[in-house]
Image (spheres, grey):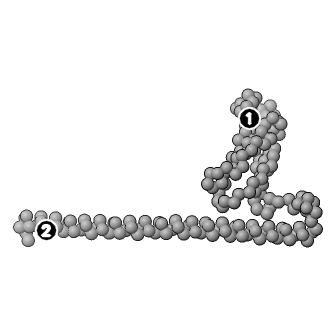
Amino acid sequence: MTGNYRTQLYGKQREDYMPATPGLGMFVEVKDPDDKIVLSRQYGSEGRFTFTSHTPGEHQICLHSNSTKFSLFAGGMLRVHLDLQVGEHANDYAEIAAKDKLSELQLRVRQLIEQVEQIQKEQNYQRWREERFRQTSESTNQRVLWWSIVQTLILVAIGIWQMRHLKSFFEAKKLV
């Protein structure tokens, strides 16, 4: 996954957002679904970060500004433009071809291989989600079954108690 970001600082004089000063930095932290840190690094006011995760699921991307270090920015507003690219879209194939000196055919084969790998990853993720959903459904069905059994037992017990109570009431009044 590749992320590009750009920060802009709000200027009160111009009442508009302007490019951030060079001293402004962003701390990027990425956590996987197990809350393990995948990436933790300090960048400048504009930057690009890349990471690869082998764990399927939702990842957390946190961008922290170091603007609190500067008293000038106290109470100011900061705008962050964030562009995320996932999978084979994150690769710059022109750069790869130039670096590895690949022909057009070799580059296209590499693109196809990466697309197939991305499809396999997506299928594995969907299987994992389906398995998790199935487990949740089965657990819910089991709970509903036991709840209905408990309700039925309670209704039968209350019915038996009411019949005995009514029988003893009518016997006490000598109606039966």
Of 113 and 154, which appears nearest the observer? 113
> In terms of sequence position, does the residue under pointer 1 or pointer 2 come before the other?
1
Q: Secondary structure at mark 2?
A: helix
Residue reaching furthest top? Answer: 71
Residue 135 percent across, percent down from the top left = 53, 67
Q: Residues within 10 Å of mark 2 (few under 14, many from 20)?
A: some
Q: Is residue 63 above or below residue 174?
A: above
**Residue at which label 1 appears:** 67
Question: Image quadrant of residue 124?
Answer: bottom right
**How far apart are the alpha carbons under marks 1 and 2?**
81 Å
The residue sitting at the left extreme is: 174
**Tag of residue 167:** 2
Q: Of the numbered discs in the image, which one, if any, rests on residue 99?
A: none
Question: Mark 2 belongs to which amino acid?
Answer: Lys
Residue 95 visible to an observer of this rendering: yes
- Answer few, some or many: residues within 10 Å of disc 1's Cα (few below 14, many 20 plus, some between 14 and 19): some
Q: Is residue 8 visible?
A: no
Q: Nearer the viewer, residue 169 or 120?
A: 120
Residue plotted at (64% across, 51% down): 36
Q: Is residue 84 left or right of residue 98?
A: left
Element marked by disc 1: helix
Residue 67 in percent (x, y) is at 74, 35
Q: Amino acid at mark 1?
A: Ser
